[in-house]
Amino acid sequence: MNILGFIRDLPVTLIISSLTLAAAAAPVQAAAVELTPDNFKTTTAKGLWFIEHFSPWCGHCKNFKPTWEKLVAEAATEIPQVKTGTINCVDYGDLCNENGIAGYPTMIMFEDGQKLADFKGSREMDRLKTFMKSFVKETPAPAAPKAESKPQKPAGPVLNPTGDVLALTEDNFDSILKKGPAFIKFYAPWCGHCKKLAPVWKQLARHMQGKLTIAEVNCDENSKLCAKSGIEGYPTLFYINGDSKKSKTEYNGGRKLDQLKAFAEKASTAGVQALEKDDDLVTHLEKEGVVYVLLHDSDNQDIINNVQEAAAPLLGSPIIYSSTSPELFKRFRLFKSTPWALVALKDGDVKVPASIFKGTKSFQESSNKLNRWLLTHRLPASLELTQDTFQDVMKAPQAPLVVIAAAPKDDSLRKKIAERITELGKKWRVRTDGTGEMNGREVVFTFMDAHKWSEWMKSMYSVKYEDKDDGEKYGLEDVRVIIADHSRLVYYDADHAGTPIKFTSTNNVFAAVDDAVNKKSAYKHSESFVERIARYLNNKMTAIEMFVSNKPWHAVGIFVVFIAAVFYAITRLASGPQDPEHMFRDYKGKNGRLD
């Protein structure tokens, strides 16, 4: 068949109709609005506008063009609240100058004709969308007819909209914190560790864009602010949950990006979560190790906000789940006379709680005790000390005593050690009525890989395993045990009689803990004498440095008095040594005469 002839013989009206239908069926590619000095103000006068300022000859603009066109097309359906536009800065240089354009391409978010923020950082699709979405105000769902519910708190301002590190000063510190939580680095420009952390801190800010304020304070320029914040060394990292001083928590974890990201993600999403089903506790406990359960009456919804505020220093660890389940009230033997309670669950046991905090009708009466309870029970009774858990345990705010079993290089033995540590932790809970405390001091049972951390354990606790003769293996009875008081950098490896702690004897381990808590046994230093002197002098020098920077006029006054005293002493000495006999004659006033 002659196809061309067939087409030629078709009616013209049919061909035109077909082409029209095809054109109508083809998808229309969304395009950004081309803005000029004539239409800029009227077009952007209402709503959100994300505008690209570019130059046709700019290489970066050419490379960015496919990404921008894709963003415009996808944002039209994904983010319809934000319109997109472009300004050719070669054709409309004056308009670009008015918008403060210093390079190409530059993307700026406008709202109702006013400039909100510049987009900064890598021009990746996900980051661009996140930036645009961060300015969209959520439209509240229509209320159900005559539904009785408490008004929800209005949504707070968008945190970290640009993904940049925010510089804080004495002028803006309080106002920024009032907007929401912030992760703040206090540093000094000359500090080596601060310089090393700087690029990581910028990456963290980029990662937490739209989620959490990442900020920094230059303590050389804001010495009073740093003194007020209790900064004693650099860099110091604080997570501050709003402008409440009670919600200020120092971060002592690792400084790698992944560690900081994990902390920031968890802290920024911290809050009381609803427990959907009672059976979910098993899954949550297996995953988290420790969970808190808030049990309350369905009529008492205010308790959720109160507990959430009190739990701010926990930074999401452990997670608090709320429930009104009568079955859970019954399981934990809570009666109707208890208006609310917090239950601590540990070690995979969802039936027998580690501790229960019973609240009163007046939350204020319970608040002080609750704050201590929340911190005291946040750690599991037993766990392995690793790079991820070390800081949380050894530098915990409550400064616990930590029982450490040094595990030799033997996987089968290490498994037995882990089981034994879990057993000791559970027995200790029973002995202390679930509190895990003795004389107000929390005790945590741990084990540590003595092969992987051999150098550290040798230097800190003098623990070292030598290979046995004839290929013999170590057993549980050979496991070295120490009790560490890391807040003082001291440890105990024996009871009050000097007998080494025996890992296989529960009574011996607990007796050694009792001796350590009551200061009956002799401790050993984790540092040498020289290291202790160096640390002491370093602390003194740091204190002097902070005093000089925080109170310069006091320091000048003390320095002047010191110089005057030295000058006076030198003047007295420079007057010349006196001959004793001459001094005697002068004293008598008789110039050598005896009458």
Image (tube, grey):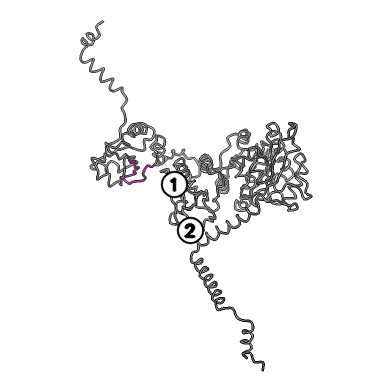
Residue 412 place in picture, x, y as percent: 70, 31
**First reached walking from the N terminus: tag 1 or tag 2:** 1
Could you tell whether 444 is left or right of 320 in the image?
Answer: right
> Considering depth in this image, is 417 or 423 the residue closer to the camera?
417
Image disc number at residue 223: 2
Residue at numbered disc 1: 165
Which residue is painted at 39% across and 34% down in the image? 125
Q: Quadrant location of the C terminus?
A: bottom right
- For the stretch drawn in magenta, the main secondary structure is strand
Residue 290 appears in which quarter of the rendering?
top right
Q: Seen from this angle, which residue lies furthest bottom?
A: 595
Crowding near pointer 2: few (<14 within 10 Å), some, many (20+)?
A: many
Crowding near pointer 1: few (<14 within 10 Å), some, many (20+)?
A: many
> Considering depth in this image, is 546 or 23 the residue closer to the camera?
546
Question: Disc 1 residue type?
Answer: Val
Q: What are the residue bounds of the magenta stretch?
A: 105-120
Question: Disc 2 residue type?
Answer: Ser
Which residue is painted at 56% across and 77% down in the image? 572
Judge whether residue 196 is colored magenta. no
Secondary element type, mark 2: helix
Could you tell whether 273 is left or right of 132 in the image?
Answer: right
